[in-house]
Each structure stands twice: as C-alpha cells, then as structure tokens.
Image: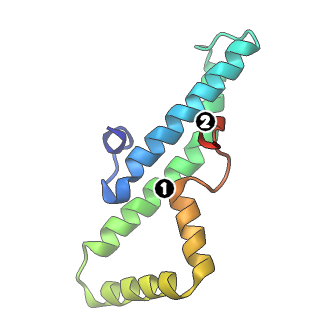
Amino acid sequence: MGDAAHRCHPVAGQGLNLGIRDAAALAQVLSEAYLRGEDVGDLRVLKRYERWRKKENLAILGFTDFLDRMFSNNWWPVVKLRRLGLWLLRTVPPLKVLALKFMTGFWGRRPALGKG
C-alpha cells in the first residue's frame, strides 16, 4: 500500500517505510493540533504535515527511482557506475552508514512514535 500511495517502485520497500513515517508524522501533527485546541482539519494544520514530510518523500522517491533505473540497465557505462557505487558502499563505512540512515528514516526529523 505504501508503494502504491507514493507511486514508487517497490525496490527495498521504500514506499512502505515512507508510509509508516508519514502516518506517524500525521498522527503527531494532528495530536499536537488537537492539544492546542486547533481544528485538526484546518488547512494550516495539514500544511505543517506537508512541509514536514515533503522533502524526505521527494528525496527518497527520487533516489528509489534512480536505483531502479541503475539496476535495470545493462548499458556498460551504467554497469560500471553501478559497480563503482556498490564498491564504495562496501569499502567506505561512513558512506554506508549515511546511505542506511537516509533510506531508513534516521536522517532528519523523526516522528515521536519512531524514536522508541
């Protein structure tokens, strides 16, 4: 469902990951608005959710699309570039950690539900 909601290729389950983080962020924004006495359906409240999630969603969706294109292409320059990227991830630990943080949602602002 997350892949379909985000219209992304199901590579690495990123749609599911995004969907879970989106649901947690929306729950947090709505809870905070409710506790402040705001109308949870007010466009300003919903815009807070949109501003929070939009950048990460676009970055992950762009990266997921890039990965799909890189791994479904057999043109030799792309194959060489793909091999170089995999080699870098395998041999440069900080790069691997950075990529994992990015793809698992541990980069940037996380919803309170995801911090336990």
Q: Quadrant of the N terminus?
A: top left
Residue located 58% across and 26% down the image: 27
Which is more toward the observer, 96 or 48? 96
Q: Which residue is mark 1?
A: 60
Residue located 63% across and 56% down the image: 107
Front of the two marks 2 and 1 = 2
- Mark 2, Cα crowd under 10 Å, few <14 / some 14-19 / many 20+, is few
Query: Who comes first in sequence, dot 2 or dot 1?
Result: 1
Q: Which residue is mark 2?
A: 113
Q: CA distance from mark 2 to mark 1?
A: 20 Å
> In the image, 61: left or right of 38?
left
Q: Residue furthest front?
A: 116
> In the image, 63: left or right of 34?
left
Which element carries disc 1, helix, strand or loop?
A: helix
- Mark 1, Cα crowd under 10 Å, few <14 / some 14-19 / many 20+, is many
Q: Position of residue 24 (x, y in %)?
A: 55, 33
Residue located 50% across and 32% down the image: 23
* Three-letter amino acid code at the position of disc 2: Leu
Q: Position of residue 90 (x, y in %)?
A: 48, 84
* Three-letter amino acid code at the position of disc 1: Ile
Which element carries disc 2, helix, strand or loop?
A: helix
